[in-house]
Each structure stands twice: as C-alpha cells, then as structure tokens.
Image: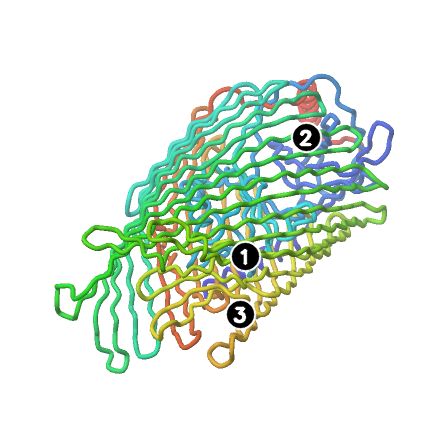
C-alpha cells in the first residue's frame, strides 16, 4: 500500500508539471559573424535572486525555447570561448521572443572568480545518471557499498553482488579505471571507501565503444575527489557515527595550482566496528540445519591520493598520480547451528563455530598521463597505469559439537586457513578524436595484462599446533591479457538528427594453473591442473538522437557487451566454509554476453524515460547444490538465458527552495535453464521495481540551513537466478548548516530511521530448501564537520565577471524590456 501511494504521488507530480499553464521564451544566439551558435547553454533566471529556473541548449541554428510559469525573469547565455551575456529583466506574462544574443569572443588572461555554484544531488544525462555525493547530506559516514545500495536502480543481494536495472554483471570503475576485484573482494574494497573520498557515482547503463566491453549491466564509475581550484587551498573534515558501536572518520586535502602546475593530495582515515546478523536455514534429505551467526567486523582504513599536472603549453598537459587504500580488518563470529532430525523434529546435536578472521587489503595505483587538445578539435589522451593489490586473510574456524542438554563437547574439529593473494595489473591506452566529415571521429586502443597469485593453506589445529592438510590446500595462478581497439563516429545532421556509430574489438587470452601443496607448503608441480582460453569478439554500438525539438528528444541505442568470469570463480579448488558448507570454482564457466536495445525520451530537460530490452546468454548464477547428501555445495554455473525488459523514469521538481528528485525503475526478468530435469530445472520469471526519492529544502536567513529526506524501496526480486528476495526499504534524514562565513559546514543525519534494512531470501534447488536472512548496523546517528581554507577561486576572466556584474546592475535598474 505504501508503494502504491508513492507511485501515485510520483505520477500525479509528473502530470501536474505537464499541465500547469506555461509561457514560452524563445530566441537565437549568434557568434560574432552572425551565424547561429549551436550547443550554447541558455539559463532562465529568476529576476529576484538570479537563481536558475530552467536550462536549455541551442540547436544547430542557435535557436532555443524555454517554457515556464508567469513571472519576472532574465536569460543568461554561456558558451566556451565567449564572454557570458545576460538579458535585461522581462515579465513573462505571455510568450516572449527575445532579441538576438550576439556573443563576443573572450580575450586576455584568465583571472580569479570565486566558485559558488553547487551541483544538483542527481543529474540525468543522455548516457548516464550522476549521483553527486559531495552535495548529499545523507551520504555522510557511509561507505561506497552503502552509497550504491541507496542509488537509483542499483540492487545488492545477500552476498553483496551488485546488479543494475535487474541485470548482474556490473563493472565497477574507480576514477574511470576498471577494478580487477569481484565477489567478496570487491565488496570488501567498496566497504573500505568512505563517502568523504567520493565526489560522484556515475551509473552508465549504455557505454559506448570507447569504454571496455566488460559489464553486461553497464558501468558504475566511482569518481574520487580532486581539487582544481587555483592558489593554495584545502579542507579538513572530521566525522563521528554511533549505532551499536562508535565509528570515526577524517579527511585532509590540500591543493596548489598556478598557470604551470597543479599539485594535489588528500588523506583519509576510517575506524569502525559494525555488527552484522546472518541466519541460514537449510532443509535437505531428512536433516534441518538451523544456523544463527552474530558478527562484529572491525575496519581501520588509510586512504590517500597525490598527483601533479604540468601544463607544458596551452595545448599539452602531463600528469602523474598515485592513490591507494590500506585496510586492516577483523571479523569475530559467534555461530550456532542446530542439527535437527526432520521426521521427528528432534534436536540431534548442536554445532558451535566461533570463528575469527584477520585480514589485510592493500591497494596502490600509479598513473602517468598526457593530454593534447587544440582549437581545431583534435584531442589525444594517453594513460599508462599500474595497479598493485595485496590481500591476506588468516582465519581460525573451530567446530565444536554438543549433545542436547550436555554442556560438555562431544567432539571437535578446529581448522585454520591462510590465504594471501597478489594481483598486478598493467595497462596502456590511447584515445584520439578529431573533426571529420562534419562530425567527430574517435579511435583508440587499450592493452591490459593481469597476473594473480593465490595461495590457500588449510591447517588442522590440534593442541594449538597447526599442521598443513595438503589435500585441502591449493595454489592458483591466473594470467589474463586483453587487447582492444575501437572506432567511433558521431555527427549532428541539420534535420535534427544526431547519429553515433561505434565498434570495439577485444581479444582475450587467459590461462589458469591450479596446484596442490606439499606438506611443507611448497607447490606440488606434478599436480598441475591447467586451463587456457582465447577468444576474440566484436562489440558494436549505435545511437540515433532526434533533437529537432530540444524540448522533446528521443534516442534509440544498441550495444553488445561481455562479462568475463572473475578469477576466483574459475579456481577448481574446493574451499571449505564450514563442516557442512563448501565452495568451489568452475573452470567451465564461460563469459556471458548481452545484447541491449533502448529507447530514451527527454521531455523539457526534466522528465527522462528509458525503456531497455536485453537478452543475456550464459548467465552467471550462484547455485547452492547438495554434496554427500546433507552438505551444501556452492558454485557458479552458466544459466542458459535471461531476458530483461526494464523501464526507468526520473523527474526533478524544483519550487523556490524545495527540490524533489524521484526515480522509478521497473524490470521484468525471465531465467531459463536445465541442469538435468526435475528439481534441477530452473525456470523463473520476476517482475520487480525500485523507487528512489530525495527531498531537499533550504531555509533560514541567507539560506544557511538545508534539510534532506531520502529513501528507497526495492520490491521482491530474484538474486542470482535461484534466490527469491523479499521487499527492502529505508529512509534517511539529515540537516546541514553553513558556518564560518561559508568556509565550513556541519552535517547531521540518521540513516535507516525506521530500522527496516532487513534482507531475506529463499531458494529451493536440487532437493534443498534454503532460507537466508540478515541485517547490519544500519541505523546510525552521524555528525560531520568540514572546514575549507585558502583560495576558492578558479581562473575565469575577471573582465568577464566585471562586465557581467555591470550588465546585471543595469538590468536591475531598467526593470524590464521596455518597448520590445
């Protein structure tokens, strides 16, 4: 009932916005030669305070059209390379055709202008949706995984697998570079990234040929902060969260920039203890396993970023950068599993497993880059990268059995696991663009080489002495080389049609070697189990945009994408989670491919609707199978097919100091697979949706106070092909005040106010019924203080600002357009 009311409210809001009486403002923007100037930004500003009411972009002839309700307005016009211009104030009581705007090219050195603009919390663009984390109060104190959980269209299942618009196979990028991590390693890394490090999250559902083809559902790019202001400046941030346990975080950033060089760096610290609850109920054959786990996870993370940009000429820039995250984590688990004989529902025995795990996850990346851009439209970007990941886990797993009513253990097995992993990634890429045949031609290449070294040692512990068990230990080496080239062309035609065509070709060569270990821990070379793959695939993409009427734009797009198996999912080693649960990689796991067609409509630059149809072959699915009658066996296999239809609708609504953003994402998904008939046949269809809403209101003298309420609702869905999930929803609330004369702010918020973030999933596969549920320390009070120091200016023409200020002054004195 709650969701029905929310959807009705969203529909009424959209309907109301479309039927309100509106007047039209039209005009033409021209260059110094009198020609219409295309792609010029036109802003309709409220005369009272020059706040932006609506934005528009001129068409190929320099024409623009903006609709708004009656009132007093002025129009601002900006275009790169030209002085900005503002009209005089006019009264929009009827349609207005303004005099032509003739822009003047900018001359002279750029001077300082104070930056006071603020990005909207969420921006909807033609190819992506951008969540601006910096400007969101309720993002304070969250990690990257939690920010994704609350992002429009994103779903995260019980195992922290990420899907977008109903499709798994999302590729995570950090600062435009793909992360090599997957599964639990990726989730752990995202949990170590704090919101104070993140500038924005980009949800790219239809990447073009310039992007890697990996990522069936698209790409989620997490952009980390980088200061670009001139002079010497910086900021200090401190935060405190409290739920069950206290949590602390802090950030220091500094930047120095002049005409020739930009030096920047930041450091952040996070210390947190988080309580988690995980329950697992399994019914297989004649036995019930009812497990209850209470976990406390401790994290200490140090993050850093440092770099330099050297502006050799006004066309060429060289840069170097290093960033990284150093994370220490501990997990304490109190686990109790009742083992019940199902026919009589009588407790047979109890398994107590109080596990401890200590881990390190360290990542350092180095980048060298070069950029060339001239006034003729030629642009070259070259990047060389090296990424170094070092992951280590030390786990102690006691398994102690008790008979009913007897406090003394009847038997025990104690295991210890050591699992270091080293990942090294080398990448070189180049992208070039130039004007050609009235359009833009782009081409480039990328070569990447990834090498992983994974060791897993399983030890039997007797009287505190560890003895390696070679039969359960493993060394897995994996190498992957991907070479790619792409060609892309886009052109705007005079009849209001823009076309983009692209193709990317990728060649993949991979090799894996799995070894047993000797009793002393050395590698047993004679036990080698190798596998090798090589394949080449084309990935075409195309888009046609009909923008003759900028107020009603349509885009039709097509793309083909791939999702390769993560190296952890290929390792044939049998990993023992506990006495009754195993996990094993699958060397036969193939890539999954997706073909997608989408239709997008953008109405009046606000209401954006996208319908996408996708067909996925060889879908990755995590299956819980049975082994030795009563034991659970977890692996990944290729489901036959998945068909998905999704509809995404987003709408921003602004009235004075109030802003609402609403996003509705719906999808229908059909899975079909057969692993041997009977209970091993999977045929699942699901209709699901998720709703995201964010409300912001500014108040108080000089509008120094901002209140924010945001929330999401995820309807019941399917996780990984076999788990049916129940609905999940949450509401956050926050308050912000600007202090220190605009140089600082204090933010307070409460996450998951109603404590509703409790997940649950059920599965019935291969004769095993499984019910998994859990929650984490989601309701927290958070406070965050930021202070900015030094210069807050960027180079823009001081002459331009003075001329603009004088024009505004004259406009306010004139009070209207007079005889026009």
Q: Earlier in the sequence, mark 3 or mark 2?
A: 2
Mark pair 3, 2: CA separation: 47 Å
Disc 2 secondary structure class: strand
Disc 3 secondary structure class: strand
Q: Is residue 138 left or right of residue 330?
A: right
Residue 792 against residue 820 in the figure, above or below: above
Mark pair 1, 3: CA separation: 25 Å
Name the residue beneath numbered marker 1. Answer: 565
State the image quarter where residue 120 is shown: top right
Tell me the quarter of the image containing the C terminus.
Answer: top right
Disc 1 secondary structure class: loop
Q: How is the image coloured?
A: rainbow
Q: Position of residue 503 (x, y in %)?
A: 74, 51
Q: Which mark is residue 371?
A: 2
Residue 21 seen anywhere in this rendered image of the structure:
yes
Name the residue beneath numbered marker 3. Answer: 686
- What's the residue at 67%, 51% (across, down)? 506
State the image quarter where residue 313 is shown: top right
Q: Position of residue 767 (x, y in %)?
A: 41, 77
């Amino acid at each position: 009932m709650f969701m029905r009311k929310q959807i009705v409210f969203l529909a009424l809001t959209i309907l109301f916005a479309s039927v309100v009486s509106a007047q039209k403002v039209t005009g033409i923007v021209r260059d110094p030669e009198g020609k219409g100037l295309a792609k010029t930004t036109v802003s309709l500003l409220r005369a009272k305070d020059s706040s932006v009411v609506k934005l528009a972009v001129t068409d190929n002839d320099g024409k623009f059209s903006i609709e708004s309700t009656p009132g007093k307005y002025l129009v601002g016009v900006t275009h790169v390379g030209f002085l900005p211009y503002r009209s005089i104030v006019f009264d929009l009581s009827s349609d207005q055709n303004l005099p032509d705007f003739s822009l003047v090219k900018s001359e002279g050195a750029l001077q300082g202008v104070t930056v006071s603009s603020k990005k909207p919390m969420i921006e909807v663009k033609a190819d992506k949706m951008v969540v601006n984390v910096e400007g969101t109060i309720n993002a304070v104190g969250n990690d990257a995984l939690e920010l994704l959980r609350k992002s429009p269209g994103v779903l995260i299942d019980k195992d922290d697998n990420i899907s977008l618009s109903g499709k798994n196979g999302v590729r995570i990028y950090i600062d435009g570079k793909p992360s090599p991590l997957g599964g639990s390693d990726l989730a752990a890394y995202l949990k170590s990234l704090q919101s104070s490090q993140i500038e924005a999250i980009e949800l790219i559902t239809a990447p073009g040929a310039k992007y890697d083809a990996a990522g069936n559902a698209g790409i989620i790019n997490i952009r980390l902060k980088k200061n670009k202001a001139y002079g010497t400046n910086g900021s200090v941030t401190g935060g405190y969260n409290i739920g069950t346990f206290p949590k602390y975080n802090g950030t220091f950033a500094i930047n120095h920039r002049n005409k020739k060089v930009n030096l920047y760096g930041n450091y952040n610290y996070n210390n947190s203890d988080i309580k988690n609850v995980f329950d697992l109920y399994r019914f297989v054959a004649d036995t019930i396993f009812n497990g209850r786990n209470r976990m406390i996870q401790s994290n200490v993370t140090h993050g850093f970023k440092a770099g330099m940009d050297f502006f050799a000429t006004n066309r060429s820039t060289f840069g170097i950068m290093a960033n990284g995250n150093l994370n220490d984590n501990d997990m304490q688990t109190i686990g109790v599993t009742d083992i019940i004989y199902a026919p009589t529902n009588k407790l047979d025995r109890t398994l107590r497993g109080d596990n401890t795990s200590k881990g390190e996850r360290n990542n350092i990346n180095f980048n060298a880059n070069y950029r060339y851009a001239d006034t003729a439209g030629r642009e070259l970007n070259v990047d060389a990268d090296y990424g170094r990941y070092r992951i280590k886990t030390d786990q102690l797993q006691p398994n102690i059995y008790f008979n009913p009513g007897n406090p003394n253990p009847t038997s025990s097995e104690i295991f210890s696991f050591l699992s270091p992993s080293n990942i090294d990634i080398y990448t070189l890429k180049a992208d070039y663009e130039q004007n050609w045949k009235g359009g833009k031609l782009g081409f480039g290449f990328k070569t990447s080489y990834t090498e992983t070294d994974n060791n897993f040692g399983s030890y039997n512990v007797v009287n505190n002495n560890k003895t390696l068990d070679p039969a359960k230990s493993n060394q897995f080496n994996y190498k992957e080389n991907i070479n790619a080239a792409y060609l892309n062309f886009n052109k705007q035609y005079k009849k209001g049609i823009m076309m983009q065509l692209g193709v990317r070709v990728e060649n993949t060569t991979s090799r894996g070697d799995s070894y047993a270990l000797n009793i002393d821990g050395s590698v047993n070379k004679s036990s080698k189990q190798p596998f090798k793959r090589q394949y080449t695939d084309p990935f075409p993409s195309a888009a046609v945009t009909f923008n003759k009427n900028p107020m009603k734009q349509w885009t039709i797009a097509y793309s083909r994408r791939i999702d390769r198996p993560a190296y952890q999912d290929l390792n044939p080693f049998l990993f023992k989670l506990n006495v009754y649960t195993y996990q094993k990689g699958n060397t036969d796991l193939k890539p999954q491919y997706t073909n997608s067609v989408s239709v997008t409509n953008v109405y009046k630059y606000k209401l954006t609707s996208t319908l996408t149809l996708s067909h996925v072959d060889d879908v990755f699915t995590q299956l819980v199978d049975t082994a030795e009658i009563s034991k659970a066996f977890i692996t990944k296999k290729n489901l036959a097919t998945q068909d998905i239809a999704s509809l995404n609708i987003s709408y921003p609504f602004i009235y004075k100091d109030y802003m609402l953003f609403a996003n509705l994402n719906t999808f229908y998904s059909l899975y079909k697979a057969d692993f041997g008939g009977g209970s091993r046949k999977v045929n699942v269809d699901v209709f699901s949706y998720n709703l995201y809403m964010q409300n912001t209101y500014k108040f108080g003298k000089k509008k120094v106070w901002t209140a924010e309420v945001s929330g999401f609702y995820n309807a019941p869905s399917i996780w990984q092909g076999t788990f049916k999930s129940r609905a999940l929803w949450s509401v956050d609330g926050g308050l912000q005040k600007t202090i220190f004369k605009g140089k600082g702010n204090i933010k307070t918020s409460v996450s998951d106010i109603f404590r509703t973030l409790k997940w649950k999933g059920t599965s019935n596969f291969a004769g095993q019924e499984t019910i998994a549920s859990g929650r984490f320390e989601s309701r927290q009070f958070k406070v965050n203080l930021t202070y900015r120091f030094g210069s807050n200016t960027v180079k823009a023409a001081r002459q331009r600002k003075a001329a603009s200020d004088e024009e505004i002054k004259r406009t306010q004195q004139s009070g209207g357009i007079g005889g026009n």
